[in-house]
């Protein structure tokens, strides 16, 4: 799955719905990227302390906010937006994908566009 992202060292990745930050740490450790770890339920204080304790304070920073609201980042700020196992918490709708697109002025038809990778996991009965 990660190979699909074509991450480069020092890319800036938004880990949308990062939870306890495990994926953010994985991305920083194995791909050398910088990560903004964003989550509504896990406090930025907790995450930043964890990243610092594990030696990633220079690679990962946390923000606690609601990803369904306007996100405070300028156009083309991120190289990649990564969202794994949390899309369903945002409503899982086309409208939310439009919100993400508009929040980052993503132009999916341009080669220099931000790479958006969203993994939607569904567990059936």
Image (cartoon, helix red, strand yellow):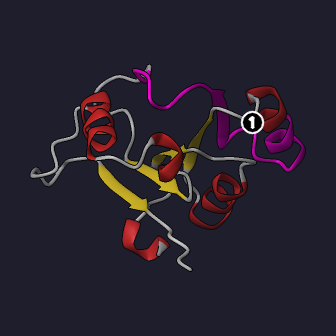
* The furthest residue to the left: 109
User: At x 63% / y 28%, what residue is drawn?
Assistant: 63
* The furthest residue to the right: 53
Q: Is residue 49 above or below residue 54?
A: above
Residue 35 occupies which quadrant of the picture?
Answer: top right
Measuring from the top left, give residue 114's x and y in whole percent.
28, 47
Position of 4 with respect to 46 (left or right) is left
Q: Secondary structure at mark 1?
A: loop
Q: Is residue 106 above or below residue 121?
A: above
Measuring from the top left, give residue 6's x and y in whole percent.
38, 67
How many numbered marks have been drawn onto this rendered protein structure? 1
Q: Is residue 101 magenta?
A: no
Position of 73 with respect to 125 (left or right) is left
User: At x 34% / y 22%, what residue is drawn?
Assistant: 74
Magenta-highlighted residues: 49-71
User: At x 21% / y 47%, what residue is drawn?
Assistant: 113
- Nearest the camera: 105 or 93? 93
- Nearest the camera: 42 or 37? 42
- Nearest the camera: 90 or 71? 90
Q: Is residue 78 above or below residue 5?
A: above
- Nearest the camera: 95 or 49? 95
Question: Which quadrant: the C terminus?
Answer: bottom right
Q: Residues within 10 Å of mark 1 (few under 14, many from 20)?
A: some
Measuring from the top left, give residue 58's x and y in whole percent.
70, 39
Q: Is residue 67 magenta?
A: yes
Measuring from the top left, give residue 118's x and y in whole percent.
40, 58
User: At x 44% / y 30%, what residue is drawn?
Assistant: 68
Return the residue at label 1. Answer: 42
Q: Is residue 125 above or below residue 38?
A: below
* The furthest residue to the front: 125
């Amino acid at each position: 799955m990660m190979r699909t992202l074509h991450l480069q060292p020092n890319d800036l990745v938004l880990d949308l719905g990062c939870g306890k930050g495990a994926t953010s740490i994985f991305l920083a450790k194995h791909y050398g990227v910088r990560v903004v770890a964003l989550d509504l339920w896990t406090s930025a204080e907790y995450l930043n302390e964890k990243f610092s304790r594990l030696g990633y304070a220079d690679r990962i920073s946390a923000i606690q906010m609601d990803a369904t609201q306007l996100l405070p980042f300028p156009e083309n700020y991120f190289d990649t937006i990564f969202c794994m196992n949390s899309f369903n918490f945002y409503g899982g709708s086309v409208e939310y994908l439009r919100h993400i697109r508009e929040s980052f002025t993503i132009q999916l038809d341009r080669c220099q566009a931000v790479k958006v990778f969203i993994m939607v996991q569904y567990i059936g009965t």
